[in-house]
Image (cartoon, helix red, strand yellow):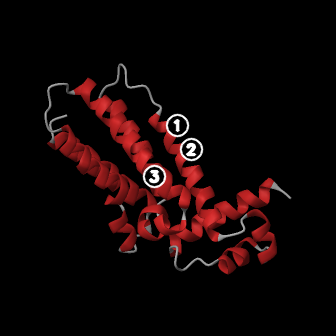
């Protein structure tokens, strides 16, 4: 069977999950949108949780690339670019955060790996910040605020039904920058 079909299933499911949410995206809806049979879908993904695991794998892969950015010789603009890239990835996979508890229940991969990925993100942020502001004492507090924006800040606009993706993403980026400026970085 074709990898193109698998990619089409994942791309379509990601769009459906981001638009409708996990509870409104049964496998029947996926098969109708992709125009394949239920049997064809189960050939690639025996359970919906397998689709979630595959989508989380894509999220993890993209975020890991960003997290591997060297922290040596960086300035605040590189930090902002790094944070912007994470916001863009989180927005692309926003269903993970919109339906966080349900995804945790259904995806064993997400549940097992998310906390480690979150820890790595904090570690990398702290490395950036240690280089930019080695004498700052409130880095943990700043990170907690940045993390809230990274994971959940733009979701309020999504939940309220705002459709302009670029505006939602830009607002989140501005929120992070404002936070960093307010914290004197």
Q: Spot the residue most to the right.
A: 1
Which percent across, then down, holds residue 138?
Answer: 15, 39
Nearer to me, 154 or 56: 56
CB under 8 Å between discs 1 and 3:
no
Q: Which residue is mark 2?
A: 61
**Marks 2 and 3: which is nearer the front?**
3
Which percent across, then down, holds residue 146?
Answer: 28, 48
Label 1 vs label 2: CA separation? 6 Å
Specify few, some or many for label 2: CA neighbours under 10 Å numbering under 14, 14-19, or 20 or more: few
Q: Which residue is mark 1?
A: 65
Label 2 vs label 3: CA separation? 12 Å
Which percent across, then down, holds residue 50?
Answer: 64, 63
Asked whether, in this view, residue 122 is left or right of residue 144, the answer is right
Residue 163 visible, this angle: no
Quarter-of-image position of residue 157 = bottom left
Which part of the image, by quadrant, shows the N terminus? bottom right
Q: Secondary structure at mark 1?
A: helix
Residue drawn 38% across and 25% down? 71
Q: Which residue is mark 3?
A: 114
CB under 8 Å between discs 1 and 2:
yes
Looking at the image, tell me whether mark 2 or mark 3 is earlier in sequence order: 2
């Amino acid at each position: 069977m074709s990898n193109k079909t698998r990619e089409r299933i994942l791309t379509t499911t990601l769009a459906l999950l981001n638009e409708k949410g996990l509870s409104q995206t049964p496998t029947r809806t996926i098969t109708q949108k992709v125009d394949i049979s239920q049997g064809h879908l189960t050939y690639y993904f025996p359970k919906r949780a397998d689709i979630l695991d595959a989508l989380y794998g894509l999220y993890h892969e993209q975020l890991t690339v960003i997290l591997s950015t060297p922290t040596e010789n960086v300035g605040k603009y590189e930090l902002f670019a790094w944070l912007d890239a994470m916001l863009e990835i989180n927005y692309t996979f926003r269903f993970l955060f919109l339906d966080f508890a349900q995804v945790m229940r259904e995806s064993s991969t997400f549940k097992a790996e998310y906390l480690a990925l979150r820890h790595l993100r904090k570690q990398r942020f702290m490395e950036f910040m240690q280089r930019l502001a080695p004498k700052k004492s409130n880095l943990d507090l700043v990170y907690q605020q940045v993390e809230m924006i990274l994971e959940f800040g733009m979701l309020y606009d999504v939940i309220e039904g705002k459709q302009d993706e670029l505006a939602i993403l830009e607002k989140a980026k501005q929120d992070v920058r404002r936070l960093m400026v307010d914290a004197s970085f």
